[in-house]
Amino acid sequence: MKLIVAAVQDQDSDYVVSKLTEKGYRVTQIGSTGGFLRQGNTTLLVGVEDAHVETVVSLLTASTQRRMRYMPMATGTTPSGMTLYNYVEVEVGGATIFVLDVEHFEQI
Ligand code: 2BA
């Protein structure tokens, strides 16, 4: 058995979860924050038999999109002390996917 951990964008999370549950996969949705942008994203946990990993990864790939985000970056200060910002473009997602071996699985 494997545990698939996937960071997806909030905009895609409801759609991805509905696609996964439609196909009979069980999923846990956790609100998370990306360390670089410090913006909200969603972490999904999907426990599956090994033979289903490829299907779930394909589903995640098909149900998420890459998007541009803009991150404010301080570039200096005016003589009056106001901070000046530029926005840096950052491309985020579709999905960042980890596939982990599950040592033990039990439901009580
Ligand atoms: P964030 O950490 O907020 O990263 C958002 C996007 O910023 C990343 O998109 C990437 O394009 C860029 N980025 C991140 N760290 C960077 C750095 N040190 N220098 C330059 N650009 C950087 P994605 O790669 O698609 O990642 C989306 C989200 O997936 C991340 O949000 C984070 O929450 C998660 N993630 C990505 N890689 C991870 C990893 N190796 N371990 C744990 N979480 C990860």
Image (spheres, rainbow, N blue to C red):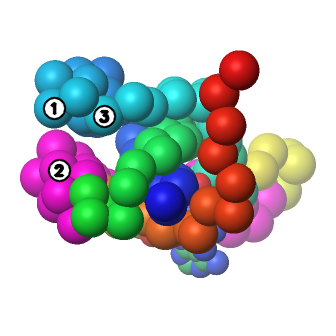
**Dot label at residue 59:** 2
Label 3: which secondary element: loop
Q: Is residue 98 above or below residue 38?
A: below
> Which circle, 2 or 3, is nearer the viewer?
3
Label 1: which secondary element: loop
Label 2 vs 1, first from the N-terminus: 1
> Which circle, 2 or 1, is nearer the viewer?
1
Residue visible at 39% across and 30% down? 26
What amino acid does circle 3 point to? Tyr
Give the residue pinned by disc 3.
25
* Residue 83 percent across, percent down from the top left: 76, 50
- The answer to whether marks 3 and 1 mark residues whose Cβ atoms lie closer than 8 Å is yes
Q: Is residue 95 left or right of residue 62?
A: right
Q: Give residue 30's quadrant in the image.
A: top right
* Residue 44 percent across, percent down from the top left: 49, 40
- The answer to whether marks 2 and 1 mark residues whose Cβ atoms lie closer than 8 Å is yes
Residue visible at 44% across and 64% down? 97
Query: Which of 5 and 51 lies nearest the eye of the viewer?
Result: 51
Q: Quadrant of ligand 1?
A: bottom right
Q: Residue furthest left?
A: 62
Label 2 vs 3, first from the N-terminus: 3
Give the residue pinned by disc 1.
23
Q: Is residue 26 above or below residue 100?
A: above
**Dot label at residue 70:** none
Q: Mark 2 Cα within 10 Å, few/some/many (few <14, many 20+)?
A: some
